[in-house]
Image (tube, rainbow, N blue to C red):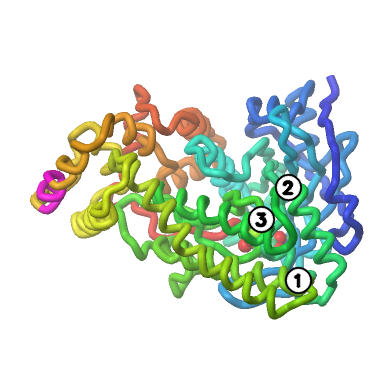
């Protein structure tokens, strides 16, 4: 049987300002590692053999209807503007309309060099490919907007990083790959017509109700505010919130050195390249605002009355911190079982976080233990927590079913760093058992599952991962 992917491409019609046509570079011996059947069904990708999946998602065979291209974009990396980034190791095959009526990009990542590769080899190695596969699918199951993973293919080739590593290609699925950095590219070059074209495209693709550039800005702000609050609520640290990794659709994109926290630390950083802690856990809301300000700056360039636009854009950006905080409060209220609002809630939540930090509590386990009444066991010295617990119980008395609220809000399982490392170490020597088990268990993160206790266990001292590395 031949694979059928019902491509319906639109980005390719925007014109050559927006991309470079580029075929994936074939690989020596593509071998399928994983294929996400439920996602394939959603995308209406059908009828193929394992060998054909490996050939297509390894980049050796171009499926009918694909129009492969590398997208152009720029972006601020760690606060410094880089005028020329672009897909240096990714190729958009095209778009499909899913069974849900939504449009999706299908993109290969690690598929060889493009005009934007600079000094890079255009490749990815197995570790980051599996990390992105597991973490993005876990994020989806947590109910947080994210790109997804359709397939992972081993290339049979060696990729040179710190040493020789097995190469792999990830097939990433996204609502689109439009980034803040895509707008910055045209704004910085003064290409106003292209900027307008991109603005119209983004509106019709993601926010058809939005009116004009400022309407788009408002819609992106709202989506990003919800996203960042959701990350905070599960202890997720993105690690590289550069403007080229900040998606217009409001999805989590680019799983490089990302990580979920084990014990709670407000200033936690994992990324080995984030030396100043710019993208630390508690900085994420203000970085999201900074990124939105860059989008505002870019969007304004196309407007006829810049002064009026500046005023409006400023107002839109300045409203973002309060929106993030409101959503943060709503989500953390739910984490402690509250659906109503009382004036004391902010203090109640902040005090719990402080007690967790001082007492070295595991973020995920502490919240999931609240509903079971066993949260005190998470502390070596539970006095401070017990005092908090008395306040909290009084507050819960005003609520209908706090336990049910907590169970729906607090995951039992997150993709823990030390297990991801263990999974990658296994896969490198051909053992995919942990990769498969993590995918299976993390597909239902809010449900306690028999035989999966080890996946809730925080790292022991010798297992703690202190730094994560970019996927390059
Ligand atoms: P990232 O940090 O993954 O968001 O990547 C930043 C930029 O570097 C993007 O333009 C990537 O396409 C490019 N890049 C990352 N890794 C490679 C690689 N191995 N080869 C070529 N370009 C790369
Ligand atoms: Mg990126």
**What residue is disc 2 on?**
208
| Foreground residue among 392 and 152 | 392
Residue depth check, mark 3 versus mark 1: number of the one nearer the observer = 3
Which residue has dot 3 on it?
Answer: 248
Q: Nearer the viewer, mark 1 or mark 2?
A: 2
Residue 98 rendering spot, x and y as whole percentages: 73, 32
Q: Residue at x 69, y 76 (%)?
A: 308
Q: Quadrant of the N terminus?
A: top right
Which residue is disc 1 drawn over? 84
Mark 2, mark 3: which one is toward the viewer? 2
- x%, y% of residue 296? 65, 69
* First reached walking from the N terminus: tag 1 or tag 2: 1
Q: Earlier in the sequence, mark 3 or mark 1?
A: 1
Identify the secondary structure beneath mark 3: loop
Neighbour class for label 2 at 10 Å: few (<14), some, many (≥20)?
Answer: some
- The answer for how far apart the CA atoms under marks 2 and 3 are is 13 Å
Relative to the observer, which residue lies in front, 347 or 38?
347
Circle 2 SS class? loop
Q: CA distance from mark 1 to mark 2?
A: 29 Å
Q: Which residues are magenta?
A: 384-390
Ligand 2: does it lie within 8 Å of the C-beta at label 2?
no
């Amino acid at each position: 049987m031949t694979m059928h992917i019902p491509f319906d491409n639109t980005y390719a019609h925007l014109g050559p300002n927006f991309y470079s046509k580029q075929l994936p570079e074939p690989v020596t011996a593509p071998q399928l590692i994983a294929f996400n059947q439920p996602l394939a069904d959603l995308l209406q990708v059908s009828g193929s053999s394992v060998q054909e999946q490996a050939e297509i998602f390894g980049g050796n065979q171009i499926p009918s209807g694909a129009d492969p291209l590398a997208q152009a974009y720029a972006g601020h990396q760690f606060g410094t503007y880089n005028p020329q980034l672009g897909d240096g190791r990714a190729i958009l095959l095209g778009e499909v309309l899913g069974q849900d009526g939504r449009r999706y990009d299908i993109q290969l990542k690690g598929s060889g060099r493009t005009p934007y590769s600079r000094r890079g080899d255009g490749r990815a190695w197995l570790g980051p490919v599996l990390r992105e596969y597991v973490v993005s699918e876990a994020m989806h199951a947590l109910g947080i907007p994210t790109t997804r993973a359709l397939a992972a293919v081993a290339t049979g080739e060696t990729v040179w990083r710190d040493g020789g590593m097995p190469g792999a290609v990830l097939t990433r699925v996204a609502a689109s790959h439009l980034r803040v950095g895509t707008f910055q590219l045209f704004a910085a070059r003064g290409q106003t017509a292209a900027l307008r074209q991109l603005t119209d495209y983004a509106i019709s693709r993601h926010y058809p109700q939005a009116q004009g550039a400022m309407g788009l800005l408002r819609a992106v702000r709202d989506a990003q505010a919800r996203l960042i609050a959701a990350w905070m609520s599960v202890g997720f640290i993105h690690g590289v919130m550069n403007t080229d990794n900040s998606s217009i659709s409001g999805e989590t994109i680019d799983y490089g050195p990302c990580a979920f926290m084990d014990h709670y630390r407000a200033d936690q950083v994992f990324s080995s390249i984030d030396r100043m802690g710019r993208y630390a856990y508690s900085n994420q809301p203000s970085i999201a605002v900074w990124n939105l300000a860059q989008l505002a700056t870019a969007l304004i360039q196309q407007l006829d009355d810049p002064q009026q636009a500046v005023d409006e854009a400023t107002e839109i950006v300045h409203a973002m911190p309060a929106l993030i905080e409101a959503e943060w409060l709503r989500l953390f209220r739910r984490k402690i079982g509250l659906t109503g609002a009382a004036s004391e809630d902010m203090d109640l939540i902040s005090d719990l976080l402080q007690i967790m930090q001082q007492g070295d509590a595991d973020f995920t386990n502490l919240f999931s233990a609240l509903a079971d009444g066993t949260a005190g066991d998470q502390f070596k010295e539970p006095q401070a927590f017990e005092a908090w617990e008395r306040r909290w119980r009084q507050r819960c008395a005003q609520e209908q079913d706090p336990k049910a609220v907590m169970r729906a809000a607090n995951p039992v399982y997150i993709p823990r760093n030390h297990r991801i490392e263990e999974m990658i170490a296994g896969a490198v020597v051909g053992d995919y058992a942990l990769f498969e088990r993590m995918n299976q268990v993390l597909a239902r993160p809010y449900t306690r599952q028999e035989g999966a206790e080890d996946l809730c266990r925080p790292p022991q001292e010798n297992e703690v991962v202190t730094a994560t590395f970019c996927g390059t």
